[in-house]
């Protein structure tokens, strides 16, 4: 299983997100850019769901001493279902990366876990799931039309 392969990783952040309270960090040894990125991502978690409603996400950032990267793992709980276990499989970031690079990594990792919970986020105005990218040094969502929106700037679309 995933955690047995990576048991040598050091946990450097724990926290959670709920629609009512946003991001709440329980513990962290990560520098400020990581916490800023998580807050911005938490804002976007509140909007643009498609399918089942996400009611809770647990976070754990894990440092891999072999490669040096930090990987955000998340456990997504969708309304009416039991929570999924912690997981993530995408792009990591490094302790000294800037907010935008960390944010793209976090968005990629959380989005994968949301999809594994059989819902979709973030959902674009024209339909379809948006993808995180770093464009000209800014973390953005790219929708299926190619339009970009900075991560942390999504608003309710209704």
Image: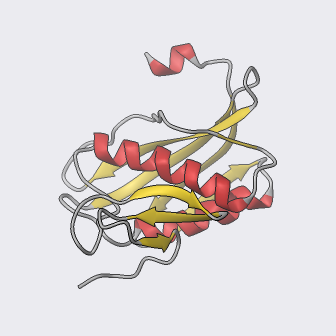
145 w.r.t. 61: above or below: below
Where the C terminus falls, by quadrant? Answer: bottom left
**Residue drawn at (29%, 58%) of the image:** 129
Q: Quadrant of residue 143?
A: bottom left
Query: In this view of the protein, which residue sits in the foreground, 144 or 57?
Result: 144
Asked if residue 79 lies left or right of residue 14, the reply is: left
Quadrant in which residue 71 is drawn: top right
Question: Residue drawn at (41%, 63%), measured in percent from left and top?
Answer: 142
Q: Is residue 55 above or below residue 5?
A: below
The quarter of the image holding the N terminus is: top left
Horizontal and vertical percent position of residue 8: 68, 18
Location of residue 124 (image quadrant): bottom left
Image height of 26 relative to 20, above or below: above
Q: Measured from the top left, where is residue 111 in percent x and y?
A: 40, 50
| Front one among 80 and 52 | 52
Residue drawn at x 67%, y 63% as measured from the top left: 137
Give the side of residue 3 with respect to residue 103, left or right: left
């Amino acid at each position: 299983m995933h955690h047995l392969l990576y048991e040598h990783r050091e946990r450097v952040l724990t926290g959670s997100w709920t629609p009512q309270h946003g991001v709440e960090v329980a513990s962290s040894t990560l520098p400020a850019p990581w916490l800023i990125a998580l807050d911005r991502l938490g804002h976007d978690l509140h909007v643009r769901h498609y399918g089942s409603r996400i009611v809770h996400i647990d976070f754990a950032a894990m440092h891999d001493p072999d490669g040096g990267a930090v990987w955000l793992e998340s456990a997504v709980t969708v309304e009416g279902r039991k929570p999924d276990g912690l997981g993530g499989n995408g792009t990591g970031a490094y302790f000294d990366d800037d907010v935008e690079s960390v944010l793209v990594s976090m968005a990629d990792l959380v989005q994968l876990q949301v999809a594994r919970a059989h819902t979709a986020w973030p959902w674009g105005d024209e339909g379809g799931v948006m993808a995180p990218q770093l464009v000209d040094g800014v973390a953005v969502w790219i929708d299926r039309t190619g339009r970009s929106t900075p991560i942390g700037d999504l608003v309710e679309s209704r």
